[in-house]
Image (tube, helix red, strand yellow):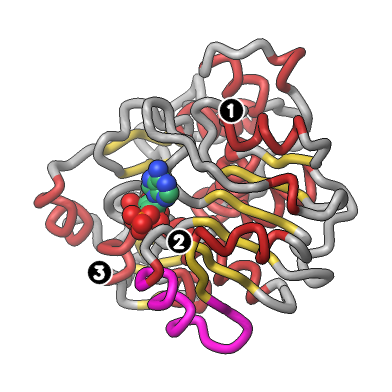
């Protein structure tokens, strides 16, 4: 929030259930403040059944736009009048923009965020150089698969505990995407350029994912979309094997960049270390974890 907020301030925000622990207000408001914008970014948490009327009520541009988080991303896409190809491919929207004429535009910047996280934390990584393995078959996995297909990955392998869910994504995304069971991990890892955990297994309090990361080539980059904890057991295992890793916080910040530009018409300022702010709010020591 800018210190000089007026009655003409531009408003954007994030909607989710729950949204209390979202880092997006911290990130966007730090950028707003640094730029001195007359703007604010607020959290919204309607009840699950109240998402559609909440969004419909915002038609007309009273609010510039919203980031959308769990569990509303699929609904957000369904409610929009004009989905971008990125949102359609992901089957979900993390960004809604409210045009003055009443139109709702749905976009998805998670894919951009994912690729920018790789660019930042694994410099030189080429998404088009080798097959990419994605673990999981929920919305996050589908978005990641769509992003790597768009980035030219020669093959995307989706591995899931429940094979049928992986097959459904592979069918939707078409050629170059294959579904396998988690028991095929060693085989799939052998030629992988990247392995991405898009399951919820790394989340605090959830079970661990037991996959043979040692089967990946030495140059393989390993990523976890979860950022709480920042170094999940999955990433710790990859680091123990000597693999380069990419964390979920880099993706969160990466998806916020194009969202901010879409809301406020200006790019985030370069000089604000939002990663350090986010790490502090997660209670982590930035000297240990800071890598971008
Ligand atoms: P989202 O839409 O947020 O990506 P989701 O639809 O709940 O989340 O999907 C969670 C994913 O994590 C699924 O792929 C799930 O596997 P199943 O489809 O077999 O349920 C996967 N997952 C969760 N916990 C897991 C665990 N302990 N081991 C392996 N996979 C797990």
- In this rendering, position of residue 195 left or right of residue 104: right
- Tag of residue 230: 1
Q: Quick one: label 2 or label 1, which is nearer the N terminus?
A: 2
SS for tag 2? Answer: strand
Q: Nearer the viewer, residue 257 or 152?
A: 152
Residue 11 visible within the image: no
Callout 2: 10 Å neighbours few (<14), some, many (20+)?
Answer: many
Q: Where is residue 80 in the image (x, y as percent from the top left)?
A: 30, 71
Which residue is found at the position 72% from the left and 57% from the top? Answer: 194
* Left or right of 281, for residue 190: right
Q: What SS does tag 3 mark?
A: helix
Q: Distance between the residues labelled 3 and 2?
A: 29 Å
Instruction: Using the image, tell me which numbered label, if any, was put on residue 160.
Output: 2
Q: Within the magenta stretch, is there residue 177?
A: yes
Q: In this view, does 195 lie to the left or right of 94?
A: right
Return the x and y of residue 110 as percentages of the image width and height. 54, 56
Given contact means CB atoms under 8 Å apart, are the residues at marks 2 and 1 in contact? no
Region rendered in magenta: 164-178
Does the magenta-highlighted stretch encompass residue 32?
no
Front residue of 196/64: it is 196
Q: Mark 2 near ligand 1 (CB under 8 Å)?
A: yes
Q: What element carries label 1?
A: loop
């Amino acid at each position: 929030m800018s210190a000089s907020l007026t009655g003409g301030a531009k408003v954007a925000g994030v909607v989710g259930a729950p949204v209390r622990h979202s880092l997006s207000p911290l990130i966007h408001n730090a950028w707003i403040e640094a730029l001195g914008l007359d703007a604010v970014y607020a959290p919204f948490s309607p009840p699950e059944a109240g998402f559609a009327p909440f969004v419909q009520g915002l038609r007309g541009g009273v609010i510039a736009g919203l980031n959308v988080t769990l569990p509303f991303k699929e609904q957000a896409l369904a409610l929009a009048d004009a989905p971008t190809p990125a949102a359609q491919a992901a089957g979900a929207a993390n960004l809604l923009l409210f045009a003055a004429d009443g139109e709702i535009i749905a976009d998805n910047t998670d894919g951009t965020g994912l690729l920018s996280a790789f660019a930042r934390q694994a410099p030189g990584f080429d998404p088009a150089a080798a097959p990419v393995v994605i673990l999981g078959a929920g919305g996050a996995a589908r978005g990641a698969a769509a992003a790597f297909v768009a980035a030219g990955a020669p093959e995307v392998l989706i591995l899931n505990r429940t094979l049928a869910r992986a097959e459904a994504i592979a069918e939707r995304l078409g050629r170059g995407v294959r579904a396998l069971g988690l028991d095929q991990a060693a085989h799939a890892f052998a030629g992988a350029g990247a392995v991405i955990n898009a399951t919820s297994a790394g989340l605090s309090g959830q079970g661990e994912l037991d996959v043979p990361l040692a089967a990946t080539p030495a140059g393989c980059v390993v990523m976890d979309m979860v950022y709480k904890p920042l170094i999940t057991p999955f990433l710790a295992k990859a680091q123990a094997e000597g693999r380069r890793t990419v964390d979920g916080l880099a993706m969160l910040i990466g998806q916020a960049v194009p969202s901010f530009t879409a809301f406020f018409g200006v790019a985030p300022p370069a000089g604000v270390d939002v990663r350090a702010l986010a790490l502090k709010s997660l209670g982590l020591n930035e000297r240990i974890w800071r890598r971008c």
